[in-house]
Image (cartoon, grey):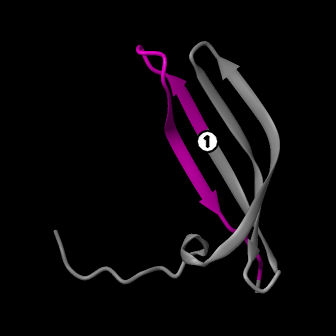
Amino acid sequence: MGGDISEDNGFAIAPYTNVRWEPEGMVINGETAMTMGNYYFMTTDGTEVKVEYTFGVERMEDGDLKIVLHHSSVPFSPS
């Protein structure tokens, strides 16, 4: 394996000035929790970018919370 992998130019590398969260739901099961929703990033020109997210969090044996799953993506927009 190896080679040159080009940058995907994804939303995460753009400069933002603010972010707000809109959680849609959460499921807690023992020491694990899953949550999903949207965040809205404010660009430097004042445009808001909607991004969907999913997080999984688990409480470790030492009591610390760790993110064990993360996915974020811009919603699909048909051409």
What residue appears at the point 74 percent right and 61 percent down from the top-left corner?
19
The amino acid pointed to by label 1 is Phe
Asked whether 65 falls inside the magenta stretch, the response is yes
Task: Locate residue 19 relative to residue 72 in the image: left or right.
Answer: right
What residue appears at the point 71 percent right and 71 percent down from the top-left corner?
17
User: On the rendered image, what quadrant is the N terminus found in?
Assistant: bottom left
Asked whether 61 falls inside the magenta stretch, the response is yes
At which x and y percent is residue 20?
79, 56
Task: Locate residue 48 relative to residue 72 in the image: left or right.
Answer: right
At which x and y percent is residue 40?
78, 63
Q: Give the range drawn in magenta.
A: 56-78
Q: Name the residue under label 1.
A: 55
Mark 1 element type: strand
User: On the rendered image, what quadrant is the C terminus found in?
Assistant: bottom right
What residue appears at the point 41 percent right and 14 percent down from the top-left corner?
61
At which x and y percent is residue 13?
54, 75
